[in-house]
Image: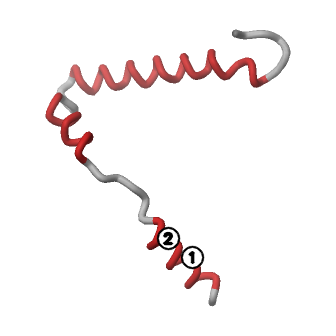
């Protein structure tokens, strides 16, 4: 709920605003054929984790120079 108390009170309103904005853009991608049901199914099977071990190795190498 929006009050005049502080920034923390704006979070729910902002979250709904950005969620609606994202949904509008997703709908546009769907409507113009950029994404479809097959695309969504492909995304559900993707493994998109950050390679932390690679990052740790490159960070430690860089800090040793």
Q: Residue at x 44, y 73 (%)?
A: 54
Q: Position of residue 18 (x, y in %)?
A: 52, 23
Q: Position of residue 15 (x, y in %)?
A: 57, 22
Query: Where, quadrant-wise, is the C terminus in this rendering?
Result: bottom right
Examine the image and state in which quarter residue 25 appears: top left
- Vertical side of 47 occupied by 52: above or below: below
Residue bearing the label numbered 1:
59
Query: Where, quadrant-wise, is the N terminus in this rendering?
Result: top right
Q: Residue 55, which numbered label?
A: 2
Report crowding for label 2: few under 14, some 14 to 19, many 20 or more residues within 10 A (C-alpha). few
Left or right: residue 34 versus residue 52 is left
Q: Residue at x 26, y 40 (%)?
A: 44
Q: Position of residue 16 (x, y in %)?
A: 54, 17
Callout 1: helix, strand or loop?
helix
- Vertical side of 41 occupied by 31: above or below: above
- Vertical side of 49 occupied by 57: above or below: below
Q: Residue at x 30, y 21 (%)?
A: 28
Callout 2: helix, strand or loop?
helix
Tag 1 near tag 2, CB within 8 Å: yes
Left or right: residue 5 versus residue 51 is right
Which residue occupies the foreground of this view, 33 or 6? 6
Q: Residue at x 75, y 24 (%)?
A: 8
Q: Position of residue 39 (x, y in %)?
A: 19, 36
Examine the image and state in which quarter residue 9 appears: top right
Left or right: residue 2 versus residue 30 is right
């Amino acid at each position: 709920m929006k009050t005049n108390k502080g920034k923390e009170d704006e979070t729910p309103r902002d979250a709904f605003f950005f969620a609606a904005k994202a949904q509008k853009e997703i709908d546009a991608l769907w409507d113009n054929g950029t994404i479809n049901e097959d695309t969504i199914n492909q995304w559900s099977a993707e493994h998109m984790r950050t390679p932390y071990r690679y990052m740790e190795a490159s960070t430690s190498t860089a800090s040793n120079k």
